[in-house]
Amino acid sequence: MRSALLAAVLVLAAAAPAAAAPHLTKIGDFASPVHVASPPGDVRLFVVEQGGLVKVVDAGGVRPDPFLDVTGLTDGGGERGLLSIAFAPDYPASGLFYVFLTAQSDGALRVIEYRRSADPDRADASSGRELLSIPHPRSNHNGGQLQFGPDGFLYVGTGDGGGGDDPDRNAQDLGSPLGKILRLDARSGAAAPGNPFGSAVWAYGLRNPWRFSFDRATGDLVIGDVGQGAWEEVDWARAADGGGRGVNFGWPCFEGSRRNANVSCDAPGAVPPAFERSHLDGYSSITGGYVVRSPGLPSLAGRYLYGDIAKGSLRSTTLAGDADREEPLPVPTVVSFGEDHCGQLYAVSLRGAVYRIDEGTPPTCAIPVAPAPPVAPGTAAADRTAPRLRARLMGARRAARTRRLRLALRCDEPCRATVVTRLRGVRKLATRRRGLAANRRTVVRVKLGRKATRRLRRALRRKPRVIVAVSVRARDGAGNRRVVKRRAKVRR
């Protein structure tokens, strides 16, 4: 059946006439959207807002009343919030759907089942049933993706628990649900039958699998795993090879295909990524996408469409052979992709816009809205305004005793901050990189190692103070940069 579907898709793509280059059609504006999905056989779109709302887009545009409101349960901001939605394969009959959120009370990762109400544009908020709750020690690396696989089971992506190079070693610990792809029987909430380790764990060794997808033609699992300090990666698990069953993707022992120099550990049988992207080339936080199977996108047929939050335009490649190219699809701060019931693709900007990716006339099964005019290549990336960045250096005076510095950062839009710290005449400290949410205070801690502390104390015996100089470079999704410098005195 799957091979027949693939053959049909390829025939349709080959038969399609030459068309204009792919372009973006704006579907609507939202408050910090992070995900978009569509129920089986339904032309409506459901847009997830980070703060805890799900909005419906239909032929009349964005409906004013939310489909679901879980703001009272959701801890939003930074990497937390209401992060995704998935509809049961039998949604037209059962009305069941599932959301992934970080809990307001303690930051736990929660998967909750809800049911559609008698009004098809409203959920029954009282029908909530918790399927999964996982304690999460820190605010970052939450994962956040829900997807029903071709086998009908619910797949859940969880981050490693945060804290840098997975200090708790969750990703390699098969007893921990963090740093994993989990596979559940959604009706019972139990581990799905056939899982490899007698638990909910399906695959492991992941840092932060923020977005993953299934190829609707082949059933392959494709995971965008956000990197640490140097490499972003996309992992490819072919359905013919088990679809990721029991696969170890290597984190934290490996970042991408390379040994992680900051960690000493073993990752038995680690599988390298299909492709990886370097931070030296401007990548900072990869957003996994979809293999394009819509006959309405012939120039992208069979290619994997993806993005990066620091890149101004979407990119596509082949998973086998990595024939990468930039597409004329400018989406700043791309945070997610989505696929509707007929395979047409959507891209989500954290800045507010959701776009459909079109090429010529949209397929008849696409949502029949009257959207804004297509976004011409290059226009959405015309942002030339550098992010406004505030930085406050704290704890410098006593750094020789406390062996640490703190830097409070705030950016007026989502941005990536790089912090370079020097003790003048003593030593350069480790560079720190952080993703900053819009208008949210983030504290970056810079530790002084033993060698730096010894040198600092020797310097302070010779003179009354040492200058600590900090340079912070912030870059937004369009590539605009702002540099802020701060300095303070370390005293005896």
Image (spheres, rainbow, N blue to C red):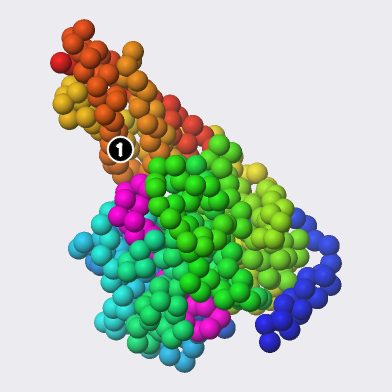
**Quadrant of the image containing the C terminus:** top left
Q: Quadrant of residue 84?
A: bottom left
Q: Is residue 279 visible?
A: yes
On the rendered structure, is 402 left or right of 22? Answer: left
On the rendered structure, is 173 left or right of 148? Answer: left
**Percent x, y for residue 24?**
63, 56
**Percent x, y for residue 117?**
36, 85
Residue found 40% across the figure and 52% down from its top? 265
Q: Quadrant of residue 192?
A: bottom left
Count of residue discs: 1
On the rendered structure, is 100 left or right of 311? Answer: left
Nearest the eye: 26 or 137: 137
Nearest the eye: 336 or 24: 336
Q: Residue furthest top?
A: 462
* Position above or below: 268 against 16: above
**Percent x, y for residue 236?**
59, 64
Q: Is residue 359 visible?
A: no
Residue found 44% across the figure and 65% down from its top? 204
Disc 1 on helix, strand or loop? strand
Q: Answer whether residue 158 is magenta in the image.
A: yes
Residue found 76% across the figure and 65% down from its top? 298
**Quadrant of the image containing the N terminus:** bottom right
* Position above or below: 121 against 415: below
Residue stretch in magenta: 145-171
Nearest the eye: 216 or 413: 216
Q: Answer whether residue 455 is magenta in the image.
A: no
Q: Quadrant of residue 241?
A: bottom right
The majority secondary structure of the magenta stretch comes to loop
* Position above or below: 5 against 53: below
Name the residue carrying label 1. 444
